Amino acid sequence: MSTAPEVPAGGAAVPENKPGQMFKSCWSCRVISGGGLVLSGAYVFNAARKMMRHGGPTSMGTVAQITFAAGLAAWGLVILADPVGKAQRKT
């Protein structure tokens, strides 16, 4: 009952797929999660705008909602763009 991974007979170790690597190569996963975050940011922003449109005062809660909505949308755009590993270092 050993839980250690077995080494292949050829002697070469096979690289294991990490969850992060799988997420980066799965375009549909990135579209669904990134799009969901952008749409949730739009929903939160609309809720804050609806309060201001009805003549409600602009309070700190409304400002916090708009800031949170911008953060959600930015996070979704980062997931969609996937900038990790694309920048090259200048030498």
Image (cartoon, rainbow, N blue to C red):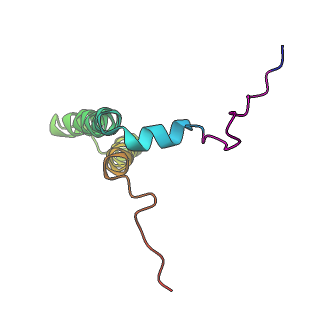
Left or right: 77, with 17 as reference point: left
Q: Which residues are magenta?
A: 3-15
Question: On the image, which quarter does residue 29 sit in?
Answer: top left
Question: On the image, which quarter does residue 41 sit in?
Answer: top left
Spot occupied by residue 9 in the image (x, y as percentages of width and height) = 70, 33
Instruction: Name the dominant secondary structure of the magenta segment.
Output: loop
Spot occupied by residue 67 in the image (x, y as percentages of width and height) = 37, 48
Question: On the image, which quarter does residue 57 sit in?
Answer: top left
The N terminus lies in which quarter of the figure?
top right
Name the residue: 71% across, 42% down: 11
In the image shown, does 53 or 39 lie closer to the viewer? 39
Residue extending farthest to the front is 10
- Report the number of discs: 0
Name the residue: 57% across, 38% down: 18
Is 50 part of what is drawn in magenta? Answer: no
Name the residue: 29% across, 34% down: 28
Left or right: 5, with 91 as reference point: right
Left or right: 61, with 4 as reference point: left
Residue extending farthest to the bottom is 91
Above or below 64: residue 32: above
Is 10 part of what is drawn in magenta? Answer: yes
